[in-house]
Amino acid sequence: MKKKLPPLNWLRSFEATARHLNITQAAAELNQTQAAISQQIKGLESQLGTPLFNRLPRGLSMTEAGKAYLPVVHECIRRLRTATDEIFGQDKTRLLTIRSNLVFFTLWLAPRFARFRERYPHVGLRFSSHIWADNFNRESDMEICYGQGAWPGMAADRLTWDELIPVCSPAMSNGLQVPRTPQDLAEHTLLHVIGYEDGWGHWLDHSGYPDLQFRNQLQFDTLISALQVARYGDGIALGRSSLVSEMISKGELIAPFNQGVKTSEAFYLVRPANQYIHPHAEIFRTWIVEEATKGN
């Protein structure tokens, strides 16, 4: 039958007393009375069913059981103390938790993140990701979401002012040529991303081709997947200018025609309104809004 795990206070009293072989010194270290230390050690010995110390006329010595038990107890307490200090020490602040739209983090935030770390090395961050966020995650301090900017009970800072831009690989697959006019899209596979209000239909309507028919279409739940398929020449994606500019500058994608259409949707930094938030939240907010304004 397994022994019940002793209380932590009993183990701490045993470990300190074993190190000092002196109850008075152990009591001073743990800020307890000698009587309390003695009682906890007796309780531990009673629960374990064996003495851990030999009580001598002029001090203590350890029994064989005590000697065998001490290294394990000492290591457990040391690791617990180290972990507590690392995570909750006085000079530690809980990590600022930011839940970000996946494509925004990958294509917009990650390339700029080194500048934040260089400027604010003391700010600890924890990132999680989502594709489409319906509700604010209570475990997050702030979120980066896509939409019209109106979320009940939330304050939002706009981060992007996008145009919709058709993008594709410089070399298409299946022997197809890069489209030169919007009419050429009829011969290509259009890559749709579900979840956006403004998609291919919006772009075609505002570009003067509302009735254009297509040979093939594919659907994705995130823009990053559609852009990767486009990058390998297997279709035409509708990029957001803030997200595809770097891929275009690197030559990974091209914009075959100069017809961008503005969209009312955007990425926003969202946080609870009129509520306490993490002390480093304002630092991150100020920085990312500055980056967004610079990019715009």
Image: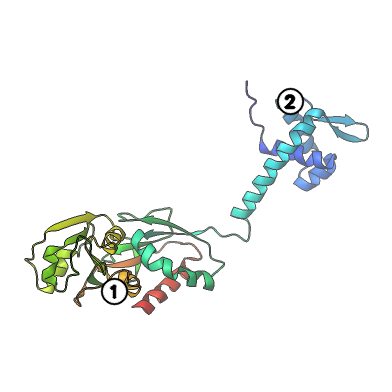
In the image, what residue type sits under mark 2? Answer: Ser
Instruction: Report if residue 82 is visible in the image.
Output: yes
Classify 157 as above or below 48: below
x 17%, y 70%: residue: 179
Instruction: Kindly give the residue lying farthest to the right in the view shown.
Output: 57
Q: Residues within 10 Å of mark 2 (few under 14, many from 20)?
A: few
Q: Quadrant of the N terminus?
A: top right
x 80%, y 38%: residue: 18
Residue under numbered circle 1: 161
Residue under numbered circle 2: 46
| C-alpha separation, residue under disc 2 versus residue under disc 1 | 71 Å
User: Callout 1: helix, strand or loop?
Assistant: loop
x 82%, y 29%: residue: 63
Q: Position of residue 182 (x, y in %)?
A: 13, 71
Q: Position of residue 57 (x, y in %)?
A: 93, 32
Q: Position of residue 131 (x, y in %)?
A: 32, 56
x 42%, y 66%: residue: 110
Classify 289 as above or below 275: below
Instruction: Kindly give the residue lying farthest to the top in the view shown.
Output: 1
User: Callout 2: helix, strand or loop?
Assistant: helix
Q: Position of residue 25 (x, y in %)?
A: 83, 44
